[in-house]
Image (cartoon, grey):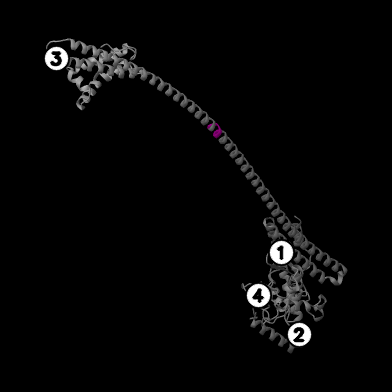
Amino acid sequence: ESDTSSIASCRSVPRDKPNIPPAAILAMFVVKVTHGETTRRLVLEEPYSFAALCALVRDRFELSDEALGTARLRYTDPDGDLISLNTDGELMEALSLLAGAEPPLLRMTLTVGESPAGTGPSWAASLAHAPPPAAAADASDKGEDSSLPPSLLGEGGAGPGRAPRLSTGSVGSDVVVVDDDEEGEGEAGSQEAEEAGGGAEAAEDERARERQEEQDRLDAEAARERELHEAEAAAERERAEAAAESERAEEARAVAAVARAEAEEASRIAREAEGREREAAERRAMEEAVRVAEEAERRERREEEEARAARKEAMRVAAEEEAQEARRAAEAARAAREEEEERARKEEEERAAAAAEATRREEEERRGEERRREESRMAREEEEAARAAAEAQAREREERAKREAEEMDRQLSLAEGGGEEEREMAARRQIALAQARERAAEAVGALLALGCSAEEARSLYAGGVVDAAVAVHEAGGIVGGIVEGVQGNSQCRDIVGGIIDSAVSGGGGGGAPAA
């Protein structure tokens, strides 16, 4: 708001203010110099010199003597060419381009570290031979309008509003500029010839008339300039509301420079009557411009500090976020580690429980194996006891069979008469049947001792024993006699069935079967 109000105060021109020629407004120039990413705004005042510009640039950018020797200033002309500055003439040529500019702002670029081109004067030489401010003489003693800057005065007092002719470029310049206004030169030459031939009085009248016409023209241009300033002030207020802060500061400094130039020009016109008031006004205008420039500089520095603080804050926030992320990652890792430890502990407990269960099962299996071994041992003992009992019964039956055989032999020997062979065969049959009955009884007794039922033994000996006996008979065993003497397989099956029944009724082989 303060910048906007200062702009408005600088732009507000009193209606009763005397007409100021536009050329007088250019008594001060605003030069914006950019070096890398840094931009500085300089106010160039009369007398205009390249050395004064170099001194401002050196002070504002704080250049060392070594850097100052390799520094170059350049600007871009309306044709788009890049022009280098090395002399006062090149500086005046650059300032002459700002005669119709509003605000009078010249943009330049500063580069350091280049070798100077040509044999032009260096920065150090320009600063060493810088003319003092008091070297600017008052042009009023020569009858010229001192309100005009040197850029608008011709060489040798050619008249106001005419720029000096620059036919050749300076030694260190990158561009050569030639004035092509041949017709204007011809008219100036003819005018000088007429003035020389008409006499001193006619020449003086002619110069007075030309000055009056020029003054009238300048007054009309000043009126148009005031109207243009008023229209631009309204547009400036509208643009100032939407423009960026840097643009507002730039416009404020430019308008302040214009206002200071107007104040200085008005004080110069009225200095004979105002005296010390003019000096005070100039001093106040200078202080105001310096204050505005310093305020803008402080604002820029404050913005830079705020930007640095914002960057630091952003870095701090980013660091805090990274720290929080690291803490969260550490917490997650710790939770994962605890979960892994808990899972490992549970797995260890499960493995221990499984090992205990396996040990318990092994113990049970061992005990079961011991029980099975004990049962097997008891079964073997029972089987051996049964076998011993069966063997005892078999021996008893053999003895009984022997006794019966002896009895039969005795009976046979006692019997006399026919059929010796038949009686012998019958005796053999009886003996064989008795022996077979005994062996079958032993086998069935062994099966019953092992837990077989009578039905299972009967199913085995019903057909299987006869078939086995037939096979043995074919092989030439003892059973062959039994089979040959038996009349039909049905009789053998009946004998075997009787043996099984006698064994069952005898308590599992405990009693002898009936003969």
Q: Quadrant of the N terminus?
A: bottom right
> Of discs 2 and 1, which sits in the foreground?
1
Earlier-in-chain disc, 3 versus 2: 2
Q: Quadrant of residue 178?
A: bottom right
Q: Residues within 10 Å of mark 3 (few under 14, many from 20)?
A: few
Q: Residues within 10 Å of mark 4 (few under 14, many from 20)?
A: some
Are the residues tagged 2 and 1 within 8 Å (C-beta)?
no
Earlier-in-chain disc, 4 versus 3: 4
Question: Badge 1 is on which residue?
Answer: 229
Looking at the rendered structure, the secondary structure element under dot 1 is helix
Looking at the rendered structure, the secondary structure element under dot 2 is helix
Q: Residue 339 placed where, x, y %?
A: 59, 38
Question: Looking at the image, which residue is at 82% across and 69% down?
Answer: 267
Question: Looking at the image, which residue is at 74% across and 88% down?
Answer: 196
Earlier-in-chain disc, 2 versus 1: 2
Q: What stretch of residues is rendered in magenta?
A: 350-354
Residue that lies at the very extreme toward the bottom in this rendered image:
197
Looking at the rendered structure, the secondary structure element under dot 3 is helix
Q: Nearer the viewer, residue 414 or 292?
A: 414
Question: Badge 3 is on which residue?
Answer: 420
How much space separates mark 4 and mark 2, taking CA atoms?
40 Å
Question: Badge 4 is on which residue?
Answer: 83
**Is residue 91 part of the magenta span, yes or no?**
no
Q: Residue 200 placed where, x, y %?
A: 78, 87
Q: Residue 400 placed where, x, y %?
A: 28, 13
Q: Give the residue type that dot 1 points to.
A: His
How much space separates mark 4 and mark 3, taking CA atoms?
168 Å
Q: Nearer the viewer, residue 145 or 513?
A: 513
Q: Give the residue type that dot 3 points to.
A: Glu
